[in-house]
Image (cartoon, rainbow, N blue to C red):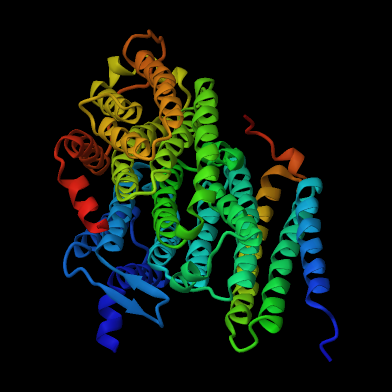
Amino acid sequence: MSSVPMSHILFVSTALFFIGMYGLFTRRNMITMLMAIELILNSVNINFVVFNKYLYPDKLDGIFFTIFIITIAAAEAAVAIAIIINLYRSHRSIDVENASEMKW
Amino acid sequence: MLTEFLYLMKAELMITIIIFILLFLKLGSKEMKAENMLNFINVLLVINLAAGFFNIPTGNLFGDMFRTNELFTLEKNFLNFGTLIISLQSYDWLKNHKHVPEFYILLLSTLLGMFFMISSSNLLMFYLGLELSTIPLAALCNFDLHQRRSSEAAFKMIMSSAFSSGLLLFGISLLYGSTGTLDFHELTLQLNDNSLQIFSLILLIAGFGFKISAVPFHLWTADVYEGSPVAVTSYLSVVSKGAILFVIVSVFYNVFTPVANSWYNMIFLISVATMIIGNLFALRQQNMKRFLAFSSIAQVGFILVGLTAQSTEGSSSVIYFILIYIFSNLGAFGVISVVSAITGKETMDDYRGFYKTNPLLTWVLAISLFSLAGIPPLAGFFGKFFLLFAGAGKGNYSLIVIAALNMVVSLYYYLKVIKAMFMDANENPIEKIHSHWQPKIAMGICVGGILITGIASGAYNYIHSLLK
């Protein structure tokens, strides 16, 4: 059953991490940036689950951590979207280039 | 079991009770006047601060996830004290605001998160405390709901803090993969210098660096500080930063001891960059909040010099400096927050000729800035002296020379503000300010603290004795 080697899954999660990072730096839409951050957090989730399943199957630390990360990511997204909505009311746009009143 | 729980988590439970009282007041049908509400909350905060000094608990809870002792209680008292001072100082701003209870509920939630973070003995608990202390802060940055700058600041805050906790989490997950544990004690036993652990250490330092705004990760700081309301800015720069520094001291000095050489080099480079860049950018700022943001970045650089010492002197000097930093930075922010709440003026040009109209406030700001710069009889000098002295104990004198040169550069921009206030003429100066008595008391406490803490050596000796 467990025929997939651990390195393959770790490759996926690391790729996901850097895709998220790339998306955060290149995308100019606030909602898309938020999605990129979710990608980073999900790559961490995969890491935790894989390490727990393959290396330390008798303990549950990694699984617990994953559940907490999912919960907190939801809270973070809720606050971030509330802030973006409020920003949209004053700026009439959710493009980060328009939110640049303060620089240097 | 239950009494032990109540006793050990005393500080956290006090904050939770205050949060619930405020929630019920908000939900209640009768609308309270803002002034009465503020007086009531400040009384609660004074009680909370006083309770921290009695019956100091020591012990562990929840299978060693939560631990507390005399040192942690002292650190929590520092944070309680800073919150109380900020609350007193923001009286003039909050009395015209419609959402007073919400402000305090969010503020105290972040304080609760910091308490859990300081007391944590497990990476999971630490992460939960960290998130509880950053997510409500982003909502607080947006508290001037109709100002464009405020929401822009909040957006920058939530994005950078989410990204930094992403980095931190990736580091934690790799650390978990290589050691198989999240507990601090077991982690110390499992750590060795293999490259995966060094990589995760780099990610952890990057995550921490974002939160204390050390240099490669400082870009959000100035924008967030400028856009947020002054009360939130002072909270961010003093209490929030202080809490993370307390955690860094305890984690780096107790958990990452097997990889001490690796983190020494990283902290060394970050410290040099932080001092130099923070100072250079502070030179050209015109907005007072932005100016203090860069000055606080430079101060973090000095704190990191003390952190590199890797001895008891290092950790006690860092904790001692944070106490002094609370006094001096809150003194400066107190004046700025009163001026901003009553007149709305925040740029350096507005402060020209400030001495003609408000001599007392000018002296408070001048003493605070002198203390931040490190002029001898004031507390800031002793704080920086101990930091550099501890750093010199390691024998890396180039770092000390760079720090000393940076202190000279920082003197230039602090004196520039003081010169503008005392000497420059202004046709349209800030008018005479009549603030409430509560901000005045808070500023008095700050000035008293600056004058006394440095000369009375009791504080440093006490912290040093706790760390032995």
> For the point 81% across and 67% down, which residue is it?
A11
**Residue B90 percent coordinates (x, y):** 36, 44
**Residue B329 percent coordinates (x, y):** 35, 37
State which quarter of the image contains the C terminus of chain B: bottom left
**Residue B36 percent coordinates (x, y):** 28, 56
Q: Viewed as shown, does residue B408 lie left or right of B68?
A: right
Q: Viewed as shown, does residue B225 lie left or right of B39?
A: right
Pick whichever, B223 or B383, lies toward us: B383
> For the point 17% across and 70% down, which residue is it?
B55
Asked where in the image residue A71 lies, by quadrant, the reply is: bottom right
Is residue B354 visible in the rendered image? The answer is yes
**Residue A47 percent coordinates (x, y):** 70, 71
> For the point 36% across and 35% down, which residue is it?
B392
Q: Viewed as shown, does residue B32 lie left or right of A95?
A: left
Q: Is residue A50 above or below residue B184?
A: below
State which quarter of the image contains the N terminus of chain B: bottom left
Figure disc tally? 0
Is residue B213 visible in the rendered image? The answer is no
Q: Is residue B205 above or below residue B400?
A: below
Pick whichever, B88 or B243, lies toward us: B243
Pick whichever, B424 or B21, lies toward us: B424
